[in-house]
Amino acid sequence: PTKVWAVPPFGCCFKPLATPRRLGRTHVTILRVMMWQFIIICPLVAASEMSESFEKHEKQLTKFETLSLMIAMYALFQLLEATHELLHDKHCHSMFWTIKGTFIANTAIFRLCSSIVTE
């Protein structure tokens, strides 16, 4: 059992208060939803920004996409915490960091290119 809810970016401050627990079917379903929301929201925000029909809502869309990214990162950190000891010899840390880095770099590059084009 681990403190799966007490991980960055939202729960790391509450680690002393969290109780260790095992991952159950419900928890895995919640993590899947947390990942799928990013998989759906990210392309939708990009498409809406490319269509320029939501130009006046660009700041809200950026915040919405960033929140979606943070929720997905939270799910990945929970998976990493839950599987840390079990899969230690499989070098999962590097795989998780690759996935997280890809998500963050994708969002950052899109935001940078978008700001260059709009100026």
Image (tube, rainbow, N blue to C red):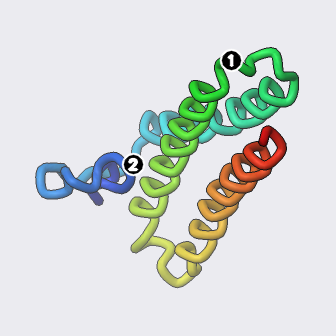
Residue 24 in the image: state x and y as whole percent: 41, 43
Residue of label 2: 23
Q: Position of residue 112 (x, y in %)?
A: 72, 52
Closer to us: 56 or 4: 56
Quick one: which residue is furthest to the bottom in this view? Answer: 89
Residue 90 placement (x, y as % from top left):
58, 79
Precedes in sequence: disc 2 or disc 1: 2
Q: Is mark 1 on a helix, strand or loop?
A: helix
- On screen, residue 84 versus residue 95, left or right, reads left
* The disc label shown at residue 56, or none: 1
User: Whole-percent x and y of residue 43?
Assistant: 78, 34
Q: Are marks 2 and 1 in contact (CB under 8 Å)?
A: no
Mark 2 Cα shell of 10 Å, populated few (<14), some (14-19), many (≥20): some
Q: Which residue is drawn at 54% across and 33% down?
A: 63
Left/right of residue 20 with respect to residue 112 in the rendered view = left
Of circles 2 and 1, which is in front?
A: 1
Q: Within the image, what quadrant is residue 37 found in?
A: top right
Does 49 sit left or right of 80 as displayed? right
**Secondary structure at numbered mark 2:** loop
Q: In which quarter of the image is the N terminus?
A: bottom left
- The correct choice, above or below, for 31 with respect to 51 in the image is below
Q: Which dot marks residue 82?
A: none
C-alpha separation, residue under disc 2 versus residue under disc 1: 42 Å
In the rendered view of the protein, which quadrant contains the C terminus?
top right
| Mark 1 residue type | Lys
Q: Residues within 10 Å of mark 1 (few under 14, many from 20)?
A: few
At horizontal 58% and vertical 66% (from top left) the residue drawn is 96
Q: Nearer the viewer, residue 72 or 2?
A: 72
Most extreme residue toward the right is 51
User: Which residue is at a point 42% across and 53% down the rendered structure image?
Assistant: 78
Amino acid type for the residue under numbered disc 2 = Leu
| Residue at point 79%, 24% (across, down) | 48
